[in-house]
Amino acid sequence: MPKPLPEKCRLCAKLLATEAKQRHGDEGDSCWDSRVCPNRRSYARHRDRRNQQRNQKRWAQQGRIAVQLTDQPLDADAIADLRSHSGIKQIQFETELPDAGYSAVLQVYRRAVDAPLVAISGEVWRGRQKEADIAPIACVTLTPRQVEIYVERLLKKLGELYGIRKFAALEELAPQSCPVQMR
């Protein structure tokens, strides 16, 4: 079983690359290793998506069916990969994918998972097109219950405007990248 990712690396992955190099490079704590850190940061940011892809590939090799809807046509490599798996039949049909509708991403700014929130913001998406930004709000002086009420009211407003009932994803970001000026 592989070693878990160190907490310091997980937190570093939230930073912009320039901030990470500055904080952990020669000017910082000298932890930055240009041979290891870019890959480790990428792994931390994209771990869930890569695990899903790995599971789908394993299911396909075991003969299970893994279906993934996409609005993009398959390229020649993807079709060849599908055909190379024994026991899998290719079914080709044309269909119009349903309208993707709107989705929202909640962005939270904090140092660690168990640390208090510094700020909250978000984005509204329609498919792959960003439709709106949710203005950031500072949470330093708010109680946890006030933050909870704010998120509930935000979802209610998103429901009225876009038909969104829940957030599609939660994105955790470093407090240094927060657009709200802390006083």
Image (cartoon, rainbow, N blue to C red):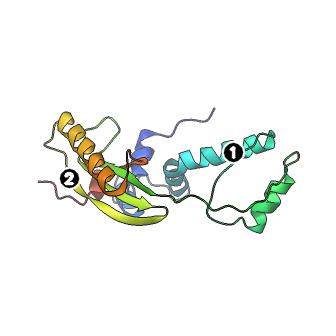
Q: Which disc is residue 56 wearing?
A: 1
Q: Is residue 4 left or right of residue 124?
A: right
Please state which amino acid type lies under the numbered disc 1: Gln
Residue in front for this viewpoint, 103 or 43: 103
Q: Position of residue 83 (x, y in %)?
A: 85, 56
The three-letter amino acid code for the residue at tag 2 is: Ile
Q: Is residue 38 left or right of residue 138?
A: right
Query: Which residue has dot 2 on it?
Result: 137
Q: Tell me which numbered mark, 1 or 2, is placed earlier along the sequence.
A: 1
Which residue does the image show at 31% across and 48% down from the upper left? Answer: 108
Q: Nearer the viewer, residue 28 or 109?
A: 109
The residue shown at (88%, 45%) is 87
Q: Quadrant of residue 81?
A: bottom right
How many callouts does the rendering have?
2
- Mark 1: few/some/many CA within 10 Å (<14, 14-19, 20+): some
Q: Is residue 53 left or right of residue 150?
A: right
Residue 174 shows in the view: no
